[in-house]
Image: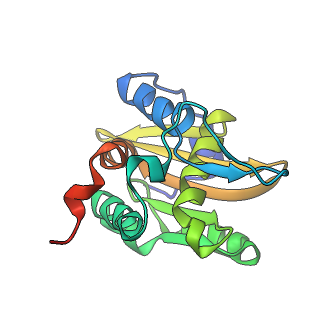
Amino acid sequence: MKNLTDDDYLATELNFGSNFQKIVQFYVLECPVVKTGSNGEVERISKRGITFEEQGWKGALFHTLKAQMMEQATPSLKCNYHPCKTEDLEEMFVQVMDSVPFGEEYCVFEMTDKKGVMRSLFSSIRHSIAHADFGMKSQGGKTAYYFVNNNGGYIKAKIVLMETTLIKWIATFKSDPQRFKQK
């Protein structure tokens, strides 16, 4: 099958099944990301969310979370995971979208700083769903989600993840981080 374009994903009917509901609940209503407001106060992006830190994903365990998430994705995501500086985004969008076929995952997104890479990823997924700038495509029993984080015409992220990956990431986030501690 040919590589899919933005329009291919966004033109599809959405399937509001139980997995979709779980994805919306977690990535939108319970998003673990916090931001610093203009007044310097830290606030949750989703008022119902439990932050990474509150869940226990802090320090070395925060890096473990990313490693666990990559293990649960398709092998292609390990090669196509690109947190980028603003000036590199457009080139990376073209490079990845031209080379990654359906059923393979990729994450190309703007990172604000190296310490905030996971927060940027979760935030991009959240904003895409919350602003209905996403699509789903099913083929051969697999469902891919296509997310675009569009901020007033400026594209901050293009991400394709399989539904199974998104569900596994939720379970990993909600698990006890202490089980991954080195003994």
Up-down relation of residue 15 to residue 43 (above or below): above
How far across and down, in percent of the image, does residue 59 sit?
42, 68
At horizontal 57% and vertical 47% (from top left) the residue drawn is 125
Left or right, 2 with reference to 180: right
How far across and down, in percent of the image, does residue 83 sit?
58, 70
Foreground residue among 112 and 153 = 112
How far across and down, in percent of the image, does residue 152 sit?
85, 48
Q: Quadrant of the C terminus?
A: bottom left
How far across and down, in percent of the image, does residue 163 sit?
38, 42
Can the viewer see residue 95 in this picture? Answer: no
At horizontal 61% and vertical 56% (from top left) the residue drawn is 158
Foreground residue among 152 and 114 = 114
At horizontal 37% and vertical 43% (from top left) the residue drawn is 170
The image quarter containing residue 139 is: top left
Left or right, 160 with reference to 173: right
- Residue most toward the left? 183
Up-down relation of residue 38 to residue 100 (above or below): above
Can the viewer see residue 45 in this picture? Answer: yes
Q: Quadrant of the N terminus?
A: bottom left
At horizontal 20% and vertical 57% (from top left) the residue drawn is 179
Left or right, 38 with reference to 130: right
Foreground residue among 126 and 103 = 126
Up-down relation of residue 8 to residue 178 (above or below): above
